[in-house]
Amino acid sequence: LDNLLLFAKYHHIDSDLAKAHADHLLAEMKLLDYKHKSVQSLSGGMKRRLAIARALILGCGVAACGACTVLVDGQAQRS
């Protein structure tokens, strides 16, 4: 969560809006259970999902099809 909030602050996004959006993104990326973990403790696939969440916190939408996300990580593909 801190990673996303720091990124949002760097891009001058309102902190209340950023927190709400970050929680939503972490839930969508199935990372909500890891929101208080350090980035270093995440698996490679989780780090890639966090990078996607960082891009999305800026408010731009990204269309992702199954074929595009196959390489993100296996856990995301199974769910």
Image (spheres, helix red, strand yellow):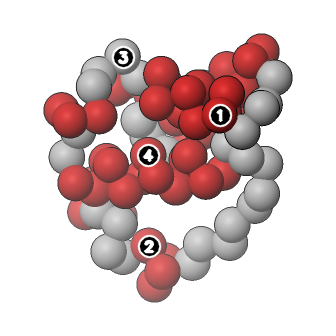
Side (left or right) of 21 relative to 49: right
Q: CA distance from mark 1 to mark 4?
A: 16 Å
Residue that badge 4 annotates? 50
- The mark nearer the N terminus, 2 or 4, is 4
Determine if residue 73 is in view. yes
Q: Nearer the viewer, mark 3 or mark 2?
A: 3
Side (left or right) of 49 relative to 11: left
Q: CA distance from mark 3 to mark 2?
A: 25 Å
Q: Nearer the viewer, mark 1 or mark 2?
A: 1
How many other residues sit within 10 Å of disc 1, few (<14), some (14-19) or many (≥20)?
few
Q: Position of residue 56 (x, y in %)?
A: 66, 51
Q: Residue at x 29, y 22 (%)?
A: 37
Q: Residue at x 20, y 35 (%)?
A: 40
Q: Position of residue 44 (x, y in %)?
A: 22, 54
Relative to 48, is 26 above or below? above
Q: CA distance from mark 4 to mark 3?
A: 13 Å
Residue at disc 1, secondary structure: helix
Pointers 1 and 3 in contact (C-beta within 8 Å): no
Q: CA distance from mark 2 to mark 4?
A: 13 Å
Q: Amino acid at mark 3?
A: His
Pointers 4 and 3 in contact (C-beta within 8 Å): no
Q: Position of residue 24 (x, y in %)?
A: 64, 32
Q: Amino acid at mark 1?
A: Tyr
Residue that badge 2 annotates? 69
| Viewer-proximal residue among 15 and 73 | 15
